[in-house]
């Protein structure tokens, strides 16, 4: 199947992108509501407009950002499709879709965020390399599938194992997806075995998204979901699972998606000095306003999302309408009618939190949002302090400029 | 035993404090090396000088900060001492020291940090209430004892339980320690049952500190260690363990140690709007220099500690010698001779990381440190943005002023 996918003519592979209207930033908001803005055609990357993103707690499939590294694979014979489980185990196994479906099914609500979310804003300080995402390379879905911990038990690796007798300490996910960064080889990533075998970590082999079968864009027929971790580790179009001794040596683990200090640039980078980024830091974004936007004077509802990596909750979202001098606390919610409490049993621990506050904006100003997670971690004020050459994890205070006027609304 | 402890004459209870010389800040550094500065006599609170704090990775018992809420209890009949395990369980149990010692013994290296560490610096912005700690209300020790998960299994609660059949969801630790905030009742705190029953969370009932029996100051005969969490939850002088449905309603859980925004003060506080603080955020502190200190021009070694809550590691420590304009990366280490790698199997995941960098300081300046944790969380630049009325979790960039001169060194 991997070979089939890449041997398809590029026109066929990209055909589905034709149904998505290509959005121009100059169009009025209303005309691109409920569609994605295409950032790149090959590979196809797209994000929804920020205002549509927070129109619901669970992101509809058609509004979920698309991040690809190669042509989108096609799996057309689902009966023959299987995942090879191999590496440091005694008996390799072929895992068919029917095997996955026979395991207990879990629905996990989890937010996936691309590490490059908000990269465009980071580039304004100093140029960075990567796809120019605005603030919508993020989405929250209900993922249905089997727990990886249950799958690994099928091949004799018990729950809560951090090392197998054969020295396996990491689980590598290999995609059908071929990409140029791997010299035509498959996209891959790994997570520690201790996380993979921990039921509480909720790592899934997912075959459903929002109650529907996974579609091709999001990894049909089977993808990994690693909650609380940058999207790059949630490998789509799963081809094989390797039990390995050291973490995956693939490009996207070792030569990308690592956090460097601002002093490191392309002429002095040493990739070996950093660990692959896994958890992401606390983040919040205003989605109800573009930057820059003209509004009428008076009451304005400011809304957006906040999310923390790991299983940390959102303790607070602060909003300022004077550029960060004074702050007000926004209300927070996940499911309608249930007040959100960080780390509470009623909250989805892997999911974003939406926030909202209605304020009076009498004059042209800068509106700012910042969140606090349940460990009291905060967002940094300035993007310069977290600038990094790959433009990942821009979690600086989110700012939008509003011009208050009496026309153009 | 609890009653015995509080009925002792106050002179006897405080007798041990007499062996500790009371330190005055004006004394030269060398004269108070290896002793604690007493901040309060009743209850007794003391911290070591910052320069002594990082003289070793494992903090010697005599340099470990002391934080008490009442007179230090005395348990003199160890054979009769026991912990009552009660609450939402069918058969309450008395847990004797011999029962604890019969369980598998674990040595866990864990850093305890008082939530009020660095409070004095926060008070400089706007006054806060609480013990005036400098930067040394923190220490790193090897705690020896039984895992709470094993203890709970003795009473029929299996590993990885988040709720018992009787509705138990939290584990409350009640101390022998009586305090005025509880109107003469015992100090208490709770953690979620899911954490208590998770072997990986390393929650201990500890009877040893750095290989020696726990001393009275640090909780003899038995204390709780909750790694990665503010010190207030690691209850000393354990008297009973309650299995309860809702989190502990004690003063220090509900009316203290909660993180409020700067806009909340004593006249508008509503304690119910916040959750008790558990994990702490990423922190780093320069310990090799006092603020303000006069040094000779030339090479200076800047060292200190960095620590993150939960089981997050320290990915980087940045040091600036120009007040935060430019930054250099410090080297990091835990055990001598083993390079520290965040989240690596060779690293103590609950322990601080020491950092060091040697720099040339030609003129009077401000030296700054800030750390990045493995989830890319960073410290906030300004203390004003995280000011809170109880002065907890001051993790703003740590700054020390050095005057460069040719005398007085």
Image (tube, coloured by chain):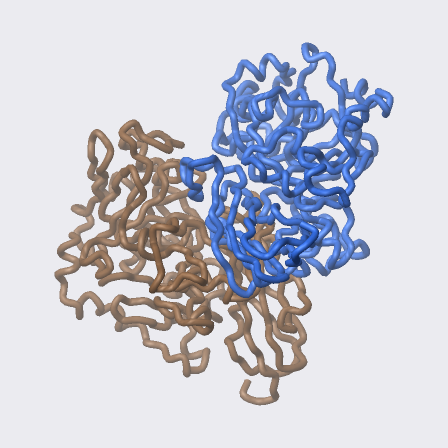
Chain colours: A brown, B blue
Position of residue B297 relative to residue A302, above or below, is above
Quadrant in the rendering for residue B220: top right
Residue B172 in percent (x, y) is at: 65, 31
Position of residue A39 relative to residue B52, above or below, is below
Residue drawn 50% across the image and 19% down it? B104
Residue drawn 50% across the image and 40% down it? B311
Quadrant in the rendering for residue A3: bottom left
Q: Can residue A351 be seen in this view?
A: no
Q: Which residue is more in the foreground, B200 or B404?
A: B404
Q: Which residue is more in the foreground, B187 or B340?
A: B340
Report the side of B242 relative to A123 (left or right): right
Q: Is residue A396 visible?
A: yes
Q: Which residue is more in the foreground, B214 or A300?
A: B214
- Taking the view exactly as shown, the residue that stands out farthest to the front is B406
Report the side of B20 relative to A54 (left or right): right
Quadrant in the rendering for residue B309: top right
Residue A150 in percent (x, y) is at: 34, 35
State how many labels appear: 0
Residue drawn 81% across the image and 56% down it? B267
Residue B183 in percent (x, y) is at: 83, 34
Position of residue B146 relative to residue A30, above or below, is above
């Amino acid at each position: 199947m991997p070979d089939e996918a890449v041997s398809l003519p590029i026109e066929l592979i990209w055909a589905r992108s034709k149904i998505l209207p290509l959005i121009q930033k100059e169009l009025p908001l209303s005309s691109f509501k409920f569609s994605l803005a295409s950032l790149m055609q090959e590979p196809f990357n797209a994000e929804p407009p920020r205002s549509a993103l927070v129109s619901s707690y669970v992101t509809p499939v058609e509004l979920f950002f698309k991040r690809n590294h190669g042509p989108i694979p096609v799996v057309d014979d689902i009966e023959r499709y299987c995942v090879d489980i191999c590496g440091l185990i005694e008996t390799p196994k072929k895992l068919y879709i029917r095997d996955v479906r026979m395991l207990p099914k879990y629905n996990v609500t989890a937010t996936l965020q691309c590490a490059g979310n908000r990269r465009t804003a980071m580039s304004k300080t100093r140029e960075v390399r990567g796809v120019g995402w605005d603030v919508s390379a993020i989405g929250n879905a209900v993922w249905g599938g089997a727990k990886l911990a249950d799958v690994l038990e099928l091949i004799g690796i018990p729950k809560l194992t951090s090392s197998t007798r054969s020295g396996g300490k990491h689980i590598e996910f290999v995609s059908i997806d071929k990409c140029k960064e791997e010299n035509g080889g498959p996209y891959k990533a790994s997570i520690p075995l201790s996380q993979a075998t921990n039921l509480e970590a909720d790592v899934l082999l997912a075959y459903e998204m929002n109650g529907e079968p996974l579609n091709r864009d999001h990894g049909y027929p089977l993808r990994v979901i690693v909650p609380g971790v940058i999207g790059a580790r949630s490998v789509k179009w799963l081809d094989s699972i390797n039990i390995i001794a050291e973490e995956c040596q693939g490009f996207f683990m070792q030569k990308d998606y690592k956090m460097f200090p601002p002093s490191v640039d392309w002429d002095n980078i040493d990739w070996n000095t950093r660990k692959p980024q896994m958890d992401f830091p606390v983040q919040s974004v205003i989605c109800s306003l573009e930057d820059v936007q003209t509004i009428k004077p008076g009451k304005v509802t400011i809304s957006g999302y906040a999310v923390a990596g790991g299983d940390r909750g959102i303790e607070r979202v602060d909003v300022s309408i004077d550029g960060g001098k004074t702050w007000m606390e926004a209300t927070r919610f996940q499911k309608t009618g249930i007040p959100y409490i960080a780390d509470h049993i009623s909250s989805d621990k892997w999911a974003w939190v939406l926030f909202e506050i209605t304020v009076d904006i009498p004059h042209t100003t800068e509106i700012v949002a910042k969140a606090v997670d349940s460990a009291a971690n905060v967002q940094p004020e300035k993007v310069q302090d977290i600038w990094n050459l790959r433009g990942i994890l821009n979690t600086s205070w989110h700012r939008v400029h509003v011009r208050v006027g009496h026309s153009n609304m």
